[in-house]
Amino acid sequence: MSRTIFEQAQVIWYLRLSLADDDGKDESNSITSQRKCIADYCKKYIPNDNIVECIDDGYSGTNFERPGFQKMMLLVKNGNVKTIVLKDLSRFGRNYLEVGYYLEYVFPSYGVRVVAINDNFDSDAVSGGMAGLEVAIRNLMNEYYSRDISKKISSAVHIKKMKGEYVYGAVPFGYRKGTVKNTIIIDPEAASIVKYVFSLALSGISYSAIAKRLNEEKVITPSVYLAKYGGRQNYKASAFWSYESVRNLLTNRIYTGDTESYKSHVKTVGTNRVKQLPVSERVVIENTHEAIISYEDFIKARDVVKMTKPKTPSKGKTGMLNGYLVCGCCGGKLTKGKAKNHYFLCVNARYRPDSACRQIRAEEKRMQEILLNAVRVQLDLFEEQDAKIRQSIDRKRSEILTLQKELTDLAVQEKRSMERKMRLYEDFVEGKILKDVYLQGKDLLAKELEGIKTKSAILSANITELSSMQQKSQDESKESRLLSGFKGQELSEDMLSVLVQKVVVMPNGEIEIFWKYKDEFYK
């Protein structure tokens, strides 16, 4: 088996930028600035060709669930990382306990040296004592800073919410942004659909029945409407109403002219763990904008729907394929409901009885076999591609070394020509040679020096071009070499999360796999 990136990695450059770092406007903290700082330092103190960049751009330092950090830890645990270099310890993290744990236990156990340039921290030179205490205090201040910034931002937003300003990001279906900042106004076309959905609910039919009715009448969905008219080009749109889309609309109090300022809250600063608040605990700011329906109709619609049989969610995990299989007709998710079921079906089939969605049936075991075979083919191709790329990188490295030697030789020639030029001048001044001889020799040396400089410029340009091509090849191969770590493994949730974006299943049983990278067959 060819050497992978895990075996090649010797030095890791870790770079992180949080959205809270002056909203990314502070150039001193930018990814570009961090990279330059690390590159300059490593060029002088830690020269190494086997470098891997791990970047977390836009991630908080108060938790370690970051893709770049996780990638770095995979490389560390493989055992061949010698040094991690970062601009300062705050880039590594702002949770002082966890930062200390990694610095004092994790990295030393793998024999990894950590260098934080601006903090003058080098783990090889620190062994407890006052140096260790200084690092602990610095980590504590980093965490305090992050929490303080978070509190200040939250406080400012809270004040605006309590004043009735709309500071909740996306504008809900039925409204659009007002001309006054942080206000919303009614969107007549979308509002008419909202009123119609509420009228159906008030007539006493269930969420599913409402979704079916809307699909039969080809009523535009909120997601399609917002993608088309709301300026959200990248908005994930579904062309069909479902149980969830109807429920979300009918349970949103925003349509009564009131705003529920807090429907959920983050459990801990820096984490993605969110706790939904019960309706009884939510803070409601009344009359913040014009209502589309009355509060009385909102309550009536909610009470009527409560009388219908509620949808019972499935319990437990429904298999590793859940969330990856997609209907080739409507684009909806495929689900098999209970864990014991063997077939995945389109979730929208019940709302679209006249569509081909009802013909979608994907057997779990067969889909797993197909995916595993496809993954293995891809991994074989990755290995072949990586070997070719590494051969190309080696050739370019050899060419660069040859050119650099030629450039060095030219530098020696230039130095000698300059020395000859100086001696020629000294001989003329001392009267050892005539003026004509001096001028003739000076012209010859000037032409010689000009030729050397021209050749040096061409060589430098060629070296730069080859270096750029080499770096591009290295970047292209990083993904292939990382993915090769799955070679020989059975299908797993980790494998799917890294490799597979989605699997589209057609009514005739054909499938199309969309990877999280470019398909090797089409490169």
Image (spheres, helix red, strand yellow):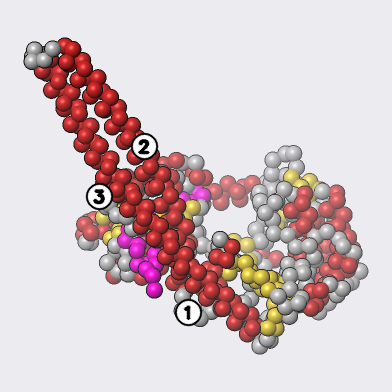
Within 10 Å of disc 3 (Cα), the crowding (few <14, some 14-19, many 20+) is few
Magenta stretch holds residue 158: no
Q: Earlier in the sequence, mark 3 or mark 1?
A: 3
Q: Is residue 166 visible?
A: yes
Q: Secondary structure at mark 2?
A: helix
- Of 142 and 335, which appears nearest the observer? 335
Q: Residue at x 79, y 46 (%)?
A: 185
Question: Left of 166 or right of it: where is 218?
Answer: right
Q: Residue at x 75, y 53 (%)?
A: 226
Q: Which residue is mark 3?
A: 45
Q: Amino acid at mark 3?
A: Tyr
Mark 3 or 2: the one toward you: 2
Mark 1 or 2: the one toward you: 2
Q: Amino acid at mark 1?
A: Gln
In 3D space, how far apart are the residues under numbered discs 3 and 2 (Cα atoms)? 29 Å
Which stretch appears magenta? 1-20
Question: Quadrant of residue 107 in the image?
Answer: bottom left
Residue 282 x/y as whole percent? 67, 61
Tag 1 and tag 2, C-beta contact below 8 Å: no
In 3D space, how far apart are the residues under numbered discs 3 and 1 (Cα atoms)? 40 Å
Question: Left of 249 or right of it: where is 321?
Answer: left
Depicted 273 relative to depicted 413: above or below: below
Residue 452 x/y as whole percent? 28, 32
Q: Residue at x 26, y 28 (%)?
A: 449
Which numbered circle lies on residue 458? 2
- Of 14 and 281, which appears nearest the observer? 14
Q: Earlier in the sequence, mark 1 or mark 2?
A: 2
- Of 136 and 399, which appears nearest the observer? 399
